[in-house]
Image (tube, rainbow, N blue to C red):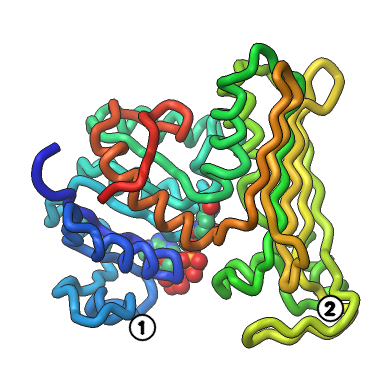
Amino acid sequence: MAGKYRVIQYGIGPIGTMVVRYLAGRPRIEIVGAVDADPVKIGRDLGDLAGLDAPLGVRVSGDATELLRRTQADAVVLTTVSSLEEAAPQVLDIVSSGKNIVSSCEELVYPWVTRPGLARAIDLAAKENRVSVLATGINPGFLMDFLPLVMTGICRNVRKVTAERYQDAQFRRLPFQKKIGVGLTPEEFADRMRGGTVRHVGLTESIHLIASGLGWQLERTGESLSAVIAQSRVTARDLTIEPGRVAGVRQIASGYRDGREAIALVFQAAVGEPNPHERIVIEGDPGIELRLNGVNGDAATCAIIVNAIPVVVEASPGLRTMADLRAVSCME
Ligand SMILES: NC(=O)c1ccc[n+]([C@@H]2O[C@H](COP(=O)([O-])OP(=O)(O)OC[C@H]3O[C@@H](n4cnc5c(N)ncnc54)[C@H](OP(=O)(O)O)[C@@H]3O)[C@@H](O)[C@H]2O)c1
């Protein structure tokens, strides 16, 4: 595509504002609109909200449907919610206005098994409106699903895929720290765990993305969640966590095939985590091990979202996944 990609930013929390800073630095991107539900942000200049040196001349709208109808754009970056149930009306509204989507919604990364009805409805609407929809990010979307899947491309056969991610959550944004229960008592953590409000979203979607890429039929999947408790006082940036309080989460997801664990994902995010790293192990022929030294999830999520815009605009219509698009690479 010659010329600039016209982009609307929908959802202006910490991820949306970081995306705006990345978009603003790209010569082939023009930001043409912005939406958020928060009354404090509505009417403000997007550049000011994102902490840019100069205003962008784009005011934040509180009425997504109206903005989408009156604004010509190639793509919408949707960074509002993790739940597909909640995101689906936003996705369908955007698609029906004829715009492609790149989203950070975790449950949209691979919803074909976990939310098949919504996946089909979004796929159909995207095809009818000749646009494509992709959800991506660091995790889910890349480190614990797409990257291990791509690594199996040099294997003659694969018996098991394991991906581990240990993060020091002090470097993540506040909403992420809240989602992993930082600072709660173990009792408060247990209450919120039962209510489903503390957890990292997307591990099961990552399992299904890997399995589908390998052509594996899984018999079942399972997920477990527990708190990481601070053993001594943790002081990190502007946070102090007393011993006995929650420093983060440990979450394990498994996919089973032929009666044994064939995919294992271990996710641990805690403030003060002593050894942040990612490790991918492919048991197969040949066996492969890859180790990274701790990727900042927020920065990487925003980068992959921005880099995916041209890929999604050029993609064939429908609900796409990272595994069925051309490679997303850093876009000048
Ligand atoms: N895949 C990945 O690797 C990855 C990585 C990072 C983040 N994420 C996900 O990306 C999303 C954004 O992250 P964040 O930290 O920026 O979240 P956040 O702090 O919750 O910000 C989301 C923003 O979107 C607004 N919003 C929510 N629903 C809306 C609606 N229906 N219409 C208009 N605006 C709406 C919110 O307004 P209110 O505050 O008024 O609700 C808020 O300003 C989260 O779901 C997060 O879990 C995914």
Identify the amino acid type marked 1: Val
Q: Label 1 near label 2: C-beta < 8 Å?
A: no
For residue 40, which numbered disc appears in the image?
A: 1
User: Residue at position x 47%, y 62% from top?
Assistant: 299
Q: Quadrant of residue 293?
A: bottom right
* Left or right, residue 2 beside residue 111: left
Does any portion of residue 53 appear in the rendered image?
A: yes
Q: Quadrant of residue 255?
A: top right
User: Residue at position x 37%, y 54% from top?
Assistant: 78
Q: Position of residue 155 (x, y in %)?
A: 64, 18
* Left or right, residue 270 beside residue 136: right
Q: Residue 69 or 284: which is nearer the viewer?
A: 284
| Residue extending furthest toward the left | 3
For residue 57, which numbered disc appears in the image?
A: none
* Left or right, residue 297 beside residue 23: right
Vertical order, 203 against 298 (above or below): above
Residue on which the image places disc 2: 245
Q: Residues within 10 Å of mark 1 (few under 14, many from 20)?
A: few
User: Residue at position x 18%, y 49% from top?
Assistant: 5
Which badge, 2 or 1, comes first in the chain's sequence?
1
Q: Residue 74 or 238: which is nearer the viewer?
A: 238
Q: Position of residue 92 (x, y in %)?
A: 34, 43
